Image (cartoon, rainbow, N blue to C red):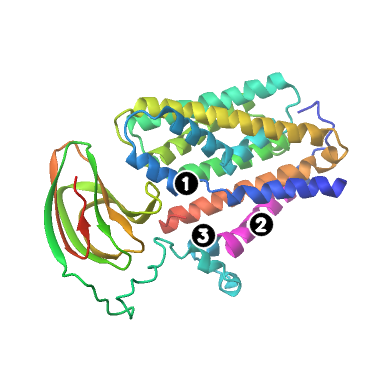
Amino acid sequence: MSTTPVMLPSPSGLLARLGGALVVAVVILLLFVMPAEYQIDPTGFGKLTGLTKMSQTVTAPPAAAPTPVMNTTAAHTYTVPFRTDEIAIPLGKDGELEYKVHMQPGGTLIYSWKCAEPLYIDFHGESDKDPGNATSYTVTQEAKEGNGSLIAPFAGIHGWFFQNQTDHVTVIHLKMSGFYELIPK
Amino acid sequence: MRYARLIFIALLCLAAPLLAHNVAARDAAFLKQNQGTQIFPFLYLGAKHMVTGYDHLLFLFGVIFFLYRLKDVAIYVTCFAVGHSVTLLSGVLTGVHVNPFLVDALIGLSVVYKAFDNLDGFRSLFGFQPNTKLMVLGFGLVHGFGLATKLQDLHLSTKGLVGNLVSFNVGVELGQLIALSIILLAMTWWRGTSDFVKHAVAANVVVMMLGFLLIGYQLTGYYTGRTA
């Protein structure tokens, strides 16, 4: 560093700058970063400025405009009866698989699945208009069962990416009911 | 003119956080649905990760801040590249999983370290100078663990993993070269002005501050267990 013509600060000046940098960092962290990124708002500044709203989880786009047969948001009606399916999905060791069904926007699906081994799951959908671009609804690092529902935010295929986290061959038992179509495989 | 330069630098600083640092969601979805060796996609992802990775870039910026000769730049950047390649490759292949928040906090510490070292802080406050090349190599190891956790979060298929991993690593180095060329261009231009001598200390203090901010950001995530 001796080749530089830059005047480096004295030890006391350096300490002051070190302290100053730390203080500024903490202030920015408390005022901006924590509210915006984690919804932690120790000063109230985040609420005042709307920063805390930024980190509310954006999992899926809000359910798109319902199809014409649906008039209210609480009660949904459909022109066809619901269907029910039970499916066994085998998974090899370290195996992974996508299981998806096709749904119209506003279509409802309720499901339960179980597996003897822990799985990594990404529940997601792909719009018919933009196949290949997945919208993730929930990601679970490790689970042996899952229960839930989905109101399809768009017309497209919706379902799960399952990945076996173990060296054992296993089977996923999936039960679904709702308004959807199976995709022929 | 002088203000134009400062504004340019400020804009660069502002732009960085706007770029998503994790492998973007769309890319992640692609990776999940594609199995087997995918050389170019992974090459691209590695490069993109580096070019948009403000923590890696801040550290690089600190490393080359006072390096005037291209030979020195090459030596230090090689130290950094060797360090992060070792942990990226071995981390993913052995499946060693380090907490991403803690790794990223350590990467923040590396930024603080380098800025502090640029200000000659070790000699000035503690009376000794750690070997700068070794330190860059050591922090390179930390940055590599950071890269490894980003890849591991994608739960890559074991099929074609080695090929994909090597592609990603090569991509990281390419991205680093691209980023480095831009930083070096800007630095050379800045050094040619009288501004540089006046603002060199302040610039390192700002980098140090950003390093502290990165540490705080990541530790908050670690303690709250929330993903940012």
Q: Residue at x 15, y 50 (%)?
A: A115
Observer-nearest residue: A129 or B151?
Answer: A129
Does residue A41 show up?
no
Marks 1 and 2 share the same chain: no
The span shown in magenta is A14-33
A105 in relation to A173, above or below: below
Q: Give SS at disc 2.
A: helix
Q: Residues within 10 Å of mark 3 (few under 14, many from 20)?
A: many
Residue A23, label in figure: 2
B88 in relation to A52, above or below: above
CA–CA distance between discs 3 and 2? 20 Å
Q: Residue at x 61, y 46 (%)?
A: B211
In the picture provided, is A35 more to the left or to the right than A132? right
| Residue under label 3 | A37
Q: Read off the chain for label 3.
A: A
CA–CA distance between discs 3 and 1? 17 Å
Observer-nearest residue: A113 or A82?
Answer: A82
Q: Give SS at disc 3.
A: helix
Residue B24, label in figure: 1
In the picture provided, is B208 more to the left or to the right than A71? right
Residue B68: x and y in percent read: 76, 25
Query: Which part of the image, by quadrant, shows the N terminus of chain A?
Result: top right
Residue B18: x and y in percent read: 59, 52
Does residue B177 show up?
yes
